[in-house]
Every structure is written in structure tokens, then in C-alpha cells.
Image (spheres, rainbow, N blue to C red):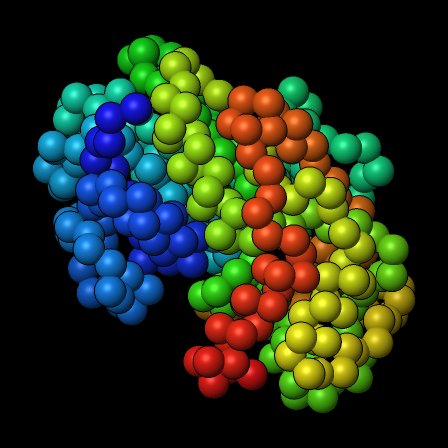
Amino acid sequence: MNKSSVMITGATGFIGSHLTRAFCEKEIKVGCLIRRGSSLSNLEGLAVELKTGDIKNIEELTSAFSGYDWVIHNAAKVADWGDYEEFHQTNVVGTINVLTACVQAGIKNILLTGSNSVYGEENCFDVKHEEAPYNSHYQYFADSFFPCKLNYYRDTKALAKKEALAFAARHDLNLTILEPVWVYGERELNTGFYEYLKTAKAGVPFVPGANQNKFHVIYAGDLARAYFLAYTKQLTGRHSILVGNEQPETMNRIYGLFCSEAGLKKPRSLPKALIYPAAFLMELLFTLFKSSTPPLLTRGRVNMFYDNIEFSIEKAKQILGFNNSFCLEEGIKRTVLWYKQQGMI
């Protein structure tokens, strides 16, 4: 295929910076949509064109996108705390704004970062795939009258997917939604892996965790390669594709490798029955007092350590020709090395 130009939203963040580097390494013209005042440290040394804009402003988006052939929409509110409306405005309204701007700028090819969570992250021993029904809302204890805010992210990503597919069909856009499992790698600070290492470094002896539950992850460098494969395939129509390692691993092994590579003692695991009540009370109190920062433990955070979560990547293999370039050990080695180089562990 002839090289074309790519505009990336959310480029200054964890996943976005890996996407940007991957496309720059292929000598493709890359533009980055950045918010006013955003830190550019993750883009240091990259030959990119910076465009200032907000995904809540269609005019700014259209202006920023003009002259580009592709848009990779990666910007999102990814968190387990906050107001629902914030998630909705960014994840749902923002996505449709991006697609609207693509239409106005004459761009037909879009890659969208989705989420595996739209299929459900509850404890399940079935291997989920792209034809599985939407199941984003996790039924936590007392969720009917005391909503868990982690569902705000999951539910808005599911709604964004539905609306994006419908919009793309109406406007005949080529939209591929890549749905990563849990991502680790250099520059990851907020999805749990780095937090676990900080906890281990602090000498905390016990943490939530089971020994045999499987957890599906992917190294950010491999995920970025999946995006490049989707770009080179130039798929027409609408597609949803899960992207992850060939096989899930037990969470116990994943965190064991992280700690071993960092030279830290892995904390011992506590039974869920001992820690869940404390998490519920913390979450309730922080909600009642309208705290802007999350508690150390919530129902969502605790359940994640005990639930079995597996997905199929057969579609990524068949359609994109995707396979892992980095084994779990190598990906973790690279990640921990970066933390050490930054003086973070």
C-alpha cells in the first residue's frame, strides 16, 4: 500500500504514545491531536505534527484532521472513579464528534480503540469472542442502589461502540474497532501493574488476589503492531477485533514475574471474603463524601484480582495476521527496565 498520513488522538497517553512511535518508525506522516497544556514528554524525540484541539469541539477536530488520510481515535476517559457524565461526554459524545469531523474532513478510514470490557469482565470460564453479546455492566454487590463507578467506563465504551458502528454504517466509513485486553508496558502508570509494584516496594505483606484465576494481557508494543497491521490491511466496512496475547496467564504468574524482574518480594494473597467488606465500606464512604479521588480499594478493584477473564484473539490472527512478537517474560522485562530507568522502583 502507498504510505498515507495518520492523525492520532490521545497520543500523549500510555497507549497513544506507543501507537505514535510505531507509526513514526514506519516513516509515516503522523499528526497528534493534543489538548491545551498537555505534557509532551511521551512524544519526545518523535517527528510528529502537533495539532491542538478538544474532542468535545467538532470545529477544532475538523481543522486538525484536514489533510490527513486516516484517524486513529484513542483518546478516552479510562478510570474507575468520577462522574458518569464525564465518562459519557468523553467516551460517547467525543467518539461521535471525532467521526463527524472525519466526515467533514473527507476521511473514510478510522481505527478506534475499544475495550474488551464491552463483552463483560465478570468471573467467567467461557472464552469470549467478538460475537458475544454486550455485557458491559458488572453486577456488583448492591450495585442497583450503589453503582460502582468502574461500570461508568465499561458502559460508556459499550455505548460508544454501538453508536460508532451505527454512525459509520450511515456514512459509509471504514471503521475498525480494536478491542485490547489489559495492556502493560513502558509508560503505564494507571492500569494496575505499576501500582502493584509500588505496593510490593512499600513492603505491604498482603494484597487481594487468587492463585489460579486467568487474566488476559498484552504488551503495548504488540498492541501498537496490531494497529499498524489494521492500517496496512485497509479493511473496508465495519469490524470489531479483540487483541491480546495468544493465551491468558494466571494473575499470580503475571505479578510474580513483575516482582521477580523488579527484585521485589511478591505480597501474599488474601481471600476475597476478608477484603471485600473493607472495599465496600471504603467505596461507600468516599462516595457519600463526594471525594474526587478514589479509595485504595473498591468493589471493582477487588473483583478484578479474583475473576477469571479470557478472550479469543482468533479474529485478529485471521484478519490481521497478528501474533505476539514479545513473550510475557520479555514484555515484563522491558516494562520493569523502563520503570527502573525512570527511578520509579
Work out which quarter of the rendered image holds the C terminus and state it.
bottom right
Above or below for 134 versus 305:
above
Residue at 65% from the left image edge and 32% from the top image edge = 313
In depth, the one of 119 and 182 nearer the eye is 182
Quadrant in which the N terminus is drawn: top left
Residue 227, by quadrant, is top left
The reply, left or right, for residue 253 in relation to residue 45 is: right
Q: Nearer the viewer, residue 106 or 169?
A: 106
Which of the two residues, 306 or 299, is positioned nearer the viewer here?
306
Asked if residue 293 can be seen in this view, the reply is yes
Q: Which residue is at 40% across, 53% downward?
A: 18
Q: Is residue 182 visible?
A: no
Closest to the observer, 136 or 13: 13
**Quadrant housing residue 208:** bottom right
Count of residue discs:
0
Is residue 273 rendered to the left or right of residue 102?
right
Check the image and report above or below for 209 versus 30: below
Classify residue 274 as left or right of residue 333: right
Residue drawn 24% across the image and 26% down it: 2
The x, y position of residue 224, in whole percent, is 45, 45
Q: Position of residue 12 (x, y in %)?
A: 32, 58
Q: Residue furthest bottom?
A: 203
Vertical placement of residue 28 versus 267, above or below? above
